[in-house]
Amino acid sequence: MDLTSKLPDDVVIHLLSFLNLKEAIRTSVLSGRWRDLWKSANLALDFEAEKELLDIYNGGILLDDTAMAEYRMWYKNAVNGVVRQLQQHNRATKHTKFRVGFTLTNPYNYGGDIDRWVEYAISKRVECLDLTFYMRFTGDTTKLYVFSEACYNHIKTPDGLSDVKSLRSLRLNCVAVRAEILEHFISSCPLLEELAVARVSNSLKKLRVVGSSQSPLRLKYLELRYFNYLKSLEIDHTPCLVRLIYDACPRMEELRVGNCPGLVDLTLGLHTRYNFAFEAFSGCASQLKSLLLKTKSVVSS
């Protein structure tokens, strides 16, 4: 009998919490006793498909469309399988992180599955929710994953508000999400420190990242990229904000920046009307330690 066989289940479960998801699941083959222990561990659920695809490309194997479709189906089934097993496990388990990252070509083939993943993550009161979808973005927002209205309706309920109070980081890429939903997360997640959103729906034209004097936001990092139709942005009562990335918002007409005494790192990206932006950030100019201006470069052969 080895030493691990003498350890109580609670100790083993605690040790499993230090492993990544794949490593923890692999321990289920060690013995019958270990088969379900990983399901009780407080694991970070990181389902990053692109790492696997990168390994395939680096190995010189280029996947055709059929092979890519098969890979995406495998990915969907793998995530569904893990989530299903965790849901069937009765023990109350907390996950610090839930992240999905894969190439999304047709959201209608995966939307219902992704909805269930997000609902599960929120029900587990994750600290980090990351929905990163990779695609060649052409401006056609019908190919984006649409954030579930059912999920939004849930997080407006008392139980739902309780579920999102632990959220510290929210990252959305290629997700069609309305301003109302983003602003609900901002106002309802008192611990939220990181918000990164890129490539949203064309309907998002106005966004307020605003706290109040009585309840200022705890945001430290704010990243807004490729808001192609955003016309109005207000940032105020964010005393903890240290870094802001504002990139590719070509239709901006109104930019208001208020109380951001901690802002020291500012990036202004492509298509920024710099005079317009400089005026908005003039109140923060003296405190900045880093200012990065990204310009579009053209290389001719």
Image (cartoon, rainbow, N blue to C red):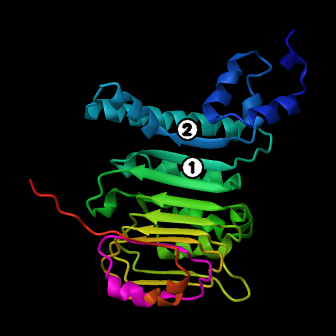
For image coordinates 46% across by 67% down, the residue present is 177
Residue 63 location in percent, x, y?
29, 30
Rendered image quadrant of residue 128: bottom right
Left or right of 280 on screen, residue 125: right
Residue 126 location in percent, x, y?
68, 54
Q: Residue 39 carries which label?
A: none
Q: What residue type is labelled 1?
A: Arg
Residue 186 location in percent, x, y?
61, 73
Q: How many marks?
A: 2
| Residue 267 located within the stretch drawn in magenta | yes
Magenta stretch in the rendered image:
255-279
Instruction: Identify the element where label 1 is drawn.
Output: helix
Instruction: State the quadrant of the N terminus.
Output: top right
Q: Which mark is residue 116?
A: 1
For image coordinates 35% across by 75% down, the residue present is 249
Instruction: Compare marks 2 and 1 and give the one earlier in the sequence.
Output: 2
Q: Is residue 56 above or below residue 232?
A: above
Instruction: Identify the element where label 2 is drawn.
Output: helix
Left or right of 213 on screen, residue 281: left
Residue 51 location in percent, x, y?
45, 37
* Pick the front one: 212 or 201: 212
Rendered image quadrant of residue 277: bottom left
> Mark 2–mark 1 contact, CB under 8 Å?
yes
Q: Mark 2 points at which residue?
A: 80
